[in-house]
């Protein structure tokens, strides 16, 4: 079921990408897709289901992201087979907009990054939650990150 949903979502986002790509010079409108991105959640308990929660730090030149406006999960476990394509085709997606709202509201976010000369596409660092504060403090104290 989930595979069919994400395949449908891939198709929808590719179509959005091409449609929007014709109007804009930006290439990343729907660059974040199931085939190019990573799914994250801002809810520590939800992330903990898969192991130790981590803080995700995207790497690359440009961040792209997508989230579903009407629910917090992309594919909830209560989805029935008959509603997969109906739900996918009628999703209200936020593409590269309102990221703070998505995070503070607890929505899953599908993100991807563009490659840069030294970083491959959709690269990220995963910082264990036990080390998150230490890394943040080190960055704040670093001369490279001071304004």
Image (spheres, rainbow, N blue to C red):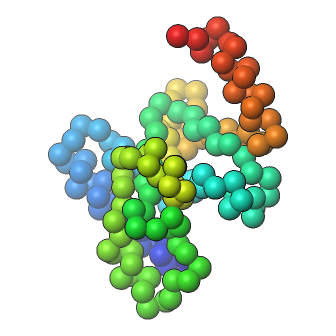
On the picture, is 123 further left or further right than 26?
right
**Residue 141 seen in render:** yes
Q: Which residue is the extreme one toward the top?
A: 143
Towards the viewer: 145 or 111: 145
On the picture, is 96 further left or further right than 55?
left
User: Residue visible at 46% across and 68% down?
Assistant: 71
- On the image, which quarter does residue 25 sit in? top left
> Residue 115 location, x and y as percent?
50, 36
> Residue 73 location, x and y as percent?
53, 67
> Residue 92 location, x and y as percent?
34, 65
Q: Which residue is the extreme one toward the front?
A: 105
Is the residue 50 above or below the residue 29 in the image?
A: below
User: Residue visible at 46% across and 44% down?
Assistant: 100
Is the residue 18 above or below the residue 140 in the image?
A: below
Towards the viewer: 15 or 128: 128
User: Residue visible at 75% across and 58% down?
Assistant: 48
Q: Which quadrant: the N terminus?
A: bottom right
> Residue 53 location, x and y as percent?
74, 51
User: Residue visible at 57% across and 38% down?
Assistant: 58
């Amino acid at each position: 079921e989930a595979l069919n949903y994400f395949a449908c979502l891939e198709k929808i986002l590719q179509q959005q990408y091409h449609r929007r790509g014709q109007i804009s010079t930006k290439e990343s409108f729907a660059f974040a897709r199931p085939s190019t991105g990573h799914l994250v959640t801002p809810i520590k308990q939800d992330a903990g289901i898969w192991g130790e929660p981590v803080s995700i730090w995207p790497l690359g030149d440009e961040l792209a992201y997508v989230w579903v406006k009407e629910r917090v999960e992309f594919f909830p476990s209560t989805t029935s087979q008959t509603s997969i394509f109906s739900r996918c085709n009628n999703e209200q997606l936020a593409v590269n907009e309102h990221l703070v709202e998505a995070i503070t509201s607890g929505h899953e976010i599908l993100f991807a990054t563009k490659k840069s000369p030294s970083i491959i596409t959709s690269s990220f660092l995963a910082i264990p939650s036990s080390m998150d504060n230490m890394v943040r403090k080190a960055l704040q104290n670093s001369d490279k990150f001071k304004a």
